[in-house]
Image (cartoon, helix red, strand yellow):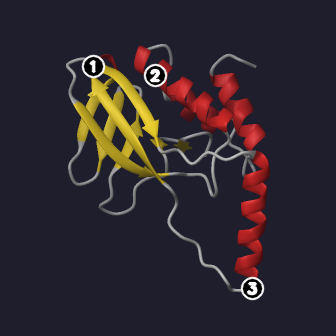
Amino acid sequence: MVGLFWITADEVYLGTPPGNGDTGVLLTPDGAHLTGPEPRDWPWPDLLDLRVEDVPVRSAPVRWTIHAVTVAAAVFDLWSPSDPALMSVALTTKGQDQATVGVYSGAAIAYSQRETDLSLGLLARFVRGESSPSVLTRWWNETPPDHLLRSREREAVLEGWLGLE
């Protein structure tokens, strides 16, 4: 996971990939694809806007505190994991057709505000045709991380994709 994106060698999802029968938003070089029971496709040139709302954002100290508390609670068997946060993906076409779908956050606790902003900036570039999700899968195939990236590392990767490094 880097930012709001779940990346594999072949696929890029917003949030986590969907489970059996669940809905997901798959991003490809051709466009955004709604997967699940009622699949739909939106080619990039047809999209006016693609937003992700209800993103769980917390500051670093709050994320670390929540992490420490949940680890301690799990150790003492006082807590069991809950479902990840549900985010909303809103798509609007140039013809003003709209769709909103829920996807689960890939962040264990929350994203940093910077990571969220960089992710949304990259999504805007996809919509404007200035970049492609293939950049993400190419990165994964060329330099797959050998560990779970920390927030600052994920931000650095996003900055590289945006040309901000």
Q: Which residue is drawn at 62% across and 38% down?
A: 140
Query: Pointer 1: what residue?
Result: 46
Residue type at mark 3: give it. Answer: Phe
- Camera-nearest residue between 75 and 63: 63
Query: Pointer 3: what residue?
Result: 76
> What x and y, as percent, mark residue 23?
32, 52
The mark nearer the N terminus, 3 or 1, is: 1
Foreground disc of the pair 3, 1:
3
Q: Is residue 9 visible?
A: yes
Q: Residue at x 31, y 22 (%)?
A: 47
> What x and y, as percent, mark residue 121?
55, 24
Query: Pointer 2: what residue?
Result: 126
* Location of residue 4 with respect to 23 vertically, above or below: above
Measure how far apart labels 1 and 2 are at the Cα level: 12 Å
Residue type at mark 1: give it. Answer: Asp
Instruction: Report whether 145 appears left or right of 55.
Output: right
- Which secondary structure, mark 3? loop
Instruction: Tell me the quarter of the picture where residue 141 sits.
Output: top right
The mark nearer the N terminus, 2 or 3, is: 3
Image quarter where the C terminus lies is top right
- Give the label on residue 138, or none: none
Disc 1: CA contacts within 10 A as few (<14), some (14-19) or many (>=20):
some
Measure how far apart labels 3 and 1 are at the Cα level: 52 Å
